[in-house]
Amino acid sequence: MRRESASSSFSRRLLLLGLAAAGAMFGLPQMAAAQDKVLNLYSSRHYDTDEALYDNFTKATGIKINRIEAGEDQLLQRMRAEGDKSPADVLITVDAGRLWRAQQNGLLQPLKNAYLEKAIPAHLREAEGHWFGFSKRARVFVVNKDKVKPGDLARYEDLADPKWKGRLLIRSSTNVYMQSLAGSMIATLGEQATETWAKAVVANLARAPKGGDTDQLKAVAAGEGDVAVSNTYYLARLINSSKADEKEVASKLAVIFPNQGDRGTHVNISGAGVARYSPNKANAIKFLEYLASPEAQNYFAKGNYEYPVVAGVPLHPVIQAWGSFKEDQISAAVFGRNNEEALKLMDRAGWK
């Protein structure tokens, strides 16, 4: 066998060092050889409690996670720019609409996996396995409990009733959570009826949309309106807060799960998929399987007050106290696909 000369060996080392330096210059995760135990994770989940989730995966498997965190649009843009040279193995993000966009941009690859398909209900994953939901977010009414009783408000459609004029607080139409809710209504009611509903919601607003879900909850507690639309975990954080002022806000609020007499409450997801050009595909699959494990599902439930997607995983006591509810079983892929049309519809309705 021909031995490598000292000069060629030195040149090869220089080349590898140059590639590593280039990766560092452009902020790319340091790529390891194929046999190394590494996973390059692109994440838009910005929750401190996820640290334990990722650390536990490394302890269990020996696979090191190189994590790039950014906003959803930034990550998708980055993956498009990187093309087939992208080091991304897994994209994890929130909302089916964003997962759908990643799929439509050709950034995820299909995956047939018996474990994931058995653990995760069909309506919470993409049919061909481009992405899977790993936690659920119920989008509910959070109301001033002194001014709104459970019988006063039962369905998303009720937000269009003139009796709520000047009493609603809600996020901007540019918020993807609102787009997905409207997307689910398009699938159920049709586009025309949903646009009529959106116009009536705009007419009932207490103020122009601004801020996030927590801002809406604080505004209801402060008397700026009586009803907000929010994901449940935002209220759970206030309830379990160490800050007295946030606990005081929570004490004035109550949860109403919409549409319990018909299709059920809208449920969105946080989910993930294997990147199209994943250089460590086997490790990526292990990571997705781990996210569906009871242990990881426990982190979602206990760490960020989310609903687990796997049956039998206990809820956080704060969430448990609200009781069980009927979920809308519409496929997340359907309302994710409807997001773009939902935004156009809300724009026509004057929903800023």
Image (cartoon, rainbow, N blue to C red):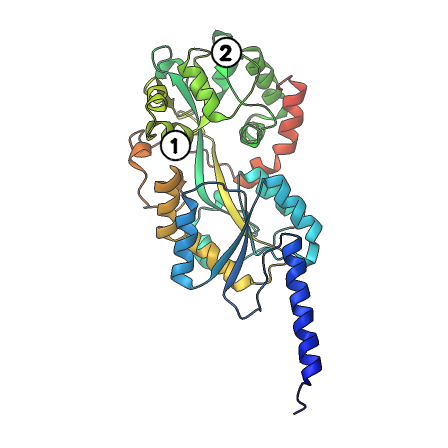
- Residue placed under numbered mark 2 in the picture: 161
Q: x, y (%) of residue 134?
A: 45, 46
Q: Secondary structure at mark 2?
A: loop
Q: Quadrant of the N terminus?
A: bottom right
Q: Residue at x 65, y 58 (%)?
A: 23
> Considering depth in this image, is 339 or 170 the residue closer to the camera?
170
Residue type indicated by callout 1:
Lys
- Residue placed under numbered mark 1 in the picture: 326
Residue 66 visible in rendering:
yes
Q: Residue at x 48, y 54 (%)?
A: 288
Q: Is residue 296 above or below residue 222?
A: below
Q: Which mark is first along the chain, 2 or 1?
A: 2
From the viewer's perspective, tell me whether residue 110 is left or right of residue 243.
right
- Marks 1 and 2 sit apart, C-alpha to C-alpha, by 23 Å
> Considering depth in this image, is 85 or 177 the residue closer to the camera?
85
Q: Secondary structure at mark 1?
A: loop
Q: Quadrant of the C terminus?
A: top right
Residue type indicated by callout 2:
Asp
Q: Which mark is residue 192?
A: none
- Crowdedness near tag 2: few (<14), some (14–19) or many (≥20) residues, C-alpha within 10 Å: some
- Crowdedness near tag 1: few (<14), some (14–19) or many (≥20) residues, C-alpha within 10 Å: some
From the viewer's perspective, tell me whether residue 135 is left or right of residue 205.
left
Q: x, y (%) of residue 220?
A: 43, 16
